[in-house]
């Protein structure tokens, strides 16, 4: 019974830490200004709990990102469009997520991840995008094309274009859609068949 109570307490602590970190990161102009001490205090746990549960700052940021991605994953898993439209939808959803969470995503790239490609969420995006690209006519190397398309929406690039270049989110989404259309070889109808073929 004691072990079950401990597990319940550990789960509550994890949820409290994620909620506190999410709120503090969202309220901050930069996640770098939020300390582990701030998060522990807001969650009502000891700092040691953070390190035992998440390992380090990078692990905590990764966990917050994963929790924010859950609704996006569920929506994309339920998508039933054509492969070509699914590629557009997946990349647009990823871009919108990065626009809305660009400070957090940029912090993730700077917080100890050796590469954004090592992050768990990158693996998921790449896999579902590669699977969709394999069904699009004319795509010869779906694995590489998925990597290349995801590189076009790296968090640091998104932050640069919006925060430094003052590109609007709508303009960035429109430019991405046009870029994807060029990569996939022109416009298509609802069935995914190229109109310019």
Image: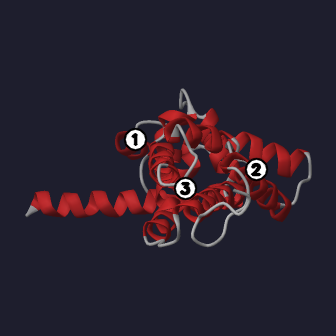
> Would you place residue 25 above or below residue 106 in this image?
below
Q: Nearer the viewer, mark 1 or mark 2?
A: 2
Task: Kindly state the secondary structure of the residue where label 3 is placed.
Answer: helix
| Quadrant, the C terminus | bottom right
Q: Earlier in the sequence, mark 2 or mark 3?
A: 3
Residue under label 2: 179
* Between 20 and 197, the one nearer to me in the picture: 197
| Quadrant, the N terminus | bottom left
Task: Kindly state the secondary structure of the residue where label 2 is placed.
Answer: helix
How many labels were placed on the picture? 3
Residue 170, position as x, y percentages in the image: 82, 65
Q: Earlier in the sequence, mark 1 or mark 2?
A: 1
**Cα distance in 3D space between marks 1 and 2:** 46 Å
Residue 158, position as x, y percentages in the image: 76, 47
- Find out whether the residues at labels 1 and 2 contact each other: C-beta distance under 8 Å: no
Tag of residue 21:
3
**Cα distance in 3D space between marks 2 and 3:** 35 Å
> Would you place residue 147 above or below residue 23 in this image?
above
Residue 74, position as x, y percentages in the image: 44, 69
Q: Residue furthest top?
A: 114
Residue at 63% over, 38% down: 148
Residue at 40% over, 41% down: 48
Q: Earlier in the sequence, mark 1 or mark 3?
A: 3
Task: Kindly state the secondary structure of the residue where label 1 is placed.
Answer: helix
Q: Residues within 10 Å of mark 3 (few under 14, many from 20)?
A: many
Q: Nearer the viewer, mark 2 or mark 3?
A: 2
Residue 62, position as x, y percentages in the image: 50, 46
Residue at 54% over, 44% down: 36
**Cα distance in 3D space between marks 1 and 3:** 15 Å
Q: Within the image, what quadrant is residue 95 found in?
A: bottom right
Residue under label 1: 48
């Amino acid at each position: 019974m004691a072990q079950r109570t401990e597990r319940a307490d550990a789960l509550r602590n994890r949820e409290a830490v994620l909620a506190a970190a999410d709120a503090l990161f969202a309220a901050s102009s930069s996640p770098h200004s939020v300390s582990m001490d701030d998060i522990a205090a807001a969650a009502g746990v000891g700092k040691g709990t953070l390190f035992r549960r998440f390992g380090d700052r990078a692990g905590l940021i990764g966990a917050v990102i994963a929790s924010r991605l859950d609704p996006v994953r569920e929506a994309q898993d339920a998508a039933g469009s054509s492969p070509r439209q699914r590629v557009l939808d997946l990349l647009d959803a990823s871009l919108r997520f990065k626009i809305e969470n660009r400070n957090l995503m940029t912090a993730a790239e700077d917080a100890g991840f050796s590469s954004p490609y090592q992050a768990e969420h990158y693996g998921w995006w790449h896999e579902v995008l590669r699977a969709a690209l394999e069904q699009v006519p004319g795509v010869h190397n779906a694995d590489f094309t998925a990597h290349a398309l995801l590189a076009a929406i790296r968090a640091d690039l998104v932050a640069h274009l919006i925060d430094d270049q003052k590109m609007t989110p709508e303009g960035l989404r429109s430019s991405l859609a046009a870029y994807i259309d060029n990569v996939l070889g022109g416009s298509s109808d609802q069935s995914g068949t190229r109109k310019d073929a």
